[in-house]
Image (cartoon, rainbow, N blue to C red):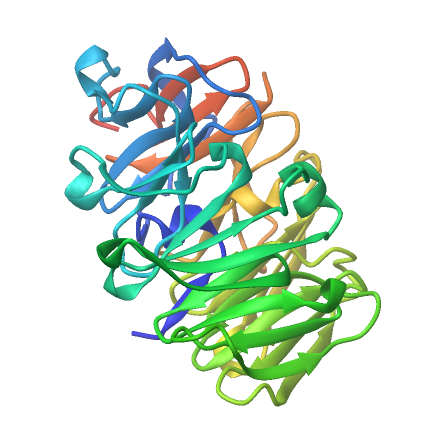
Amino acid sequence: MIDVVTARSDVLDFRARDVDLPDAPGPWRPVWSTRLDVSPGLSRLHAFGAGLALVDAPSGIVALGSEPPGAERVLAGERLYARPAVDGVPVLVDSRGVVHRWGACGAPERVWASNLPGTEVDAIGLAGGQLLLQHPHRGLLRSVFGAFGASGVTELVDPAGASVVWRRSGDRWGALPSEDGVFAILNKGRSVARLRVRDGGEAWRHSVGEPGIRELVALVAGRLWLSTYGGEILAVEAGTGAPAARLRLPRHAVPTGVVDERGYFHLCHGTRYTVLDLTAGGTQLATAELPAGPGQAVASFAMPTGDGRLVFFDVKGGVFAARAGSRDVALLRQPTSPLLSCRVAHGLLYVLTREGELSALSPSGSLEG
């Protein structure tokens, strides 16, 4: 198995791997629908193993199955924000900034109080139970911190010892942890560094320059991949920071997408779809113009399947399954209303609209599929 760590919380939190999706023509039909209380800018469907849950919702975590969820499926009973964890134990932050770990998908266990509003702190679970926290300086809102690249505070805390191991300022939002280090964006987005877990010091720093780093994409097979505001994808050696690869994709002005467990980077921008093999220096495996139909794709919430397809939704709410190199794109859901999220579990396609309507779809409109 290739060592892949990504910045996507729905993969990193719950270890969603090898998603199986029936290869059936669409549009698929609803098995059931129900309405839930959601937060339009936050609520998401997250896979954990073979299960699925609604998180970042006002009512708390809602466990989902093949039947419509009832009150007995609501866990915790309060708003909880899902955060990443490299050890496979999900991290949750409540509205008061209290950090929980969600072991075995039972009741969340309180482990740390950040003394910040839950919307203003990111908590990343590290190996050994430690937590990496990122938050704005006092008086600066997260919306400003994240959206405009302002620097903030990064700190490592040890819940078992009830102590802050180290604290540093100047890092931009969007750290990417690994099992033995933390990668951070520095210098107003112009540099990336590897931080030592033990003391927060820099093991190395690599300068990217202007126009700056957009995001840390993934750590794949010993290389850290990142994208820039200039439309490039770069790689540096994770151990040394030495430059390893530099790619420019003219077909993708904004190189965004998802990385699957094989180390394949699925870029889905507008109506263009490209797959890069990050284990082979970013070799382009396939690229295609999607046929007429999909609108602007929402790449950051796309989902690669075990058989090499990509499931994504567009700004109008249409759900599609594409395969790189093929112009035959399956329409799984008609674009009837904009979506917050879509995931696959229990052999069903779950879609959540911005109005809070949750539907489970199958090719036949029944649980038998």
**Residue 264 position in % (x across, y down):** 49, 67
Viewer-side residue, 301 vs 66: 301
- Placement of 324 over or under 148, stated as above or below: below
Q: Position of residue 302 (x, y in %)?
A: 52, 45
What residue lies at 43% left-to-right and 79% top-to-bottom? 221
Residue 312 in view here? no
The total of numbered circles placed on residues is: 0
**Position of 200 compared to 61: left or right?**
right
Q: Quadrant of residue 275?
A: bottom right
Quadrant into which the N terminus falls:
bottom left
Residue 345 at x, y percent in the picture: 29, 37
Classify the position of the C terminus by image quarter: top left
What residue lies at 37% left-to-right and 76% top-to-bottom? 180
**Up/down of 274 relative to 14, above or below:** below
Q: Nearer the viewer, residue 41 or 115?
A: 115
102 or 246: nearer the eye?
Answer: 102
Res. 340 in view: yes
When the figure is inspected, residue 198 is found, relative to residue 318, above or below; the finding is below
Q: Position of residue 39 (x, y in %)?
A: 51, 20
Residue at 32% across, 41% down: 47
Q: Quadrant of residue 63?
A: top left
